[in-house]
Image (cartoon, grey):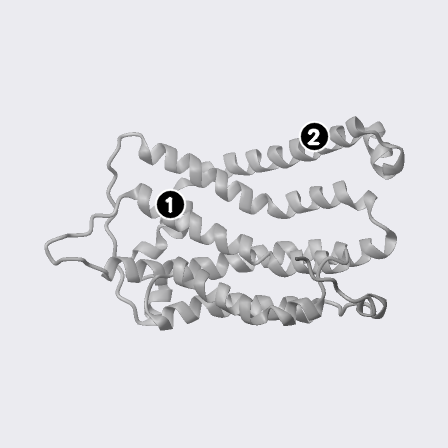
Amino acid sequence: MAEEEKRAQDPAEMSFWDHLEVLRGTLFRSLLAISVISVVVFCFKRFVFDDVVLAPTRSDFWVYKLLDMDVNMNLVNLEISTQFFVHLKVAFQLGFILAFPFVIWEIWKFIAPALYQNEKTTIRGVFLAASFLFYLGLYIGYVLIVPISLNFFLGYKISEAVVNTISLNSYISLFTSTVLAFGIVFEFPAVIVILNKLGLVYKDTMNKYRKHAIVAILCIAAIITPADPFSMLIAAAPLLILYEASVLFCKPRPAEDEAVPETDIQ
């Protein structure tokens, strides 16, 4: 362990295999943390499912009262082993979610030795903010996007002769994919700030492609919440705020770079 730390502190003298050894340690500690937390989560089955995961399936969920929605689901299990494997799946995903700050810290320790001191100051703050953004995205996905999606899908019928019978596996897939997707999407400002610090993206670039970004965000919102325009705008609002926040934290292109004319690629 001491030898590994010594090599990590002097990346210029590290070989490819030394880097690989450090990376292996990073991955091992991250997976170990996720696994341990997953085991703990697995033991709290009733709280995890009754009070958290399955809460949006009940009509008394506080978001439905706030948004004046009428959602009430009766889930069914169609295969004998589904409940056990759903339990494992949710426990592992929650293990990853709860271990996320530790994983980010491990990634930071891996890349920090390769950065200059001025880069470390900025990017360290970005890595600290990454966990907050991730959890903020999870929360918005949980209290906003999942309820809107359920309200739409349960209310959509191709015929009155068809009755919705929702399987446990179907609900869990929608729930986890939606919540995790928003957690990951909310990392966008952190990624942009890092790219800006590395000289790959600048404020003028973000301003130039703002209209394109708005169209892309509206398309994403339409896909994840294929409901009425109002619901789509509610889903798009956090993404638009994220983009503007990214622009706000981006630095403009240096003057010496602006003086160099751009060449068109034919």
Q: Residues within 10 Å of mark 1 (few under 14, many from 20)?
A: few
Name the residue beneath numbered marker 2: 24
> Tag 1's secondary structure?
helix
Tell me which residue sits at (42%, 71%) in the image: 233
Q: Residue furthest front?
A: 266
Q: Amino acid at mark 1?
A: Ser
**Residue nearer the viewer, 22 or 252:** 252
Q: Is residue 77 left or right of residue 250?
A: left
Tell me which residue sits at (55%, 71%) in the image: 211
In the rendered view, tell whether residue 238 sits above or below residue 99. Answer: below
Measured from the top left, where is residue 121 in percent x and y? 81, 57
Measured from the top left, where is residue 166 in percent x and y? 25, 47
Q: Quadrant of the N terminus?
A: top right
In the rendered view, tell whether residue 228 sits above or below residue 182. Answer: below
> Tag 2's secondary structure?
helix
Q: Which mark is on residue 210? A: none
**Residue nearer the viewer, 235 or 196:** 196
Q: Amino acid at mark 2?
A: Arg
Measured from the top left, where is residue 182 in percent x and y? 50, 56
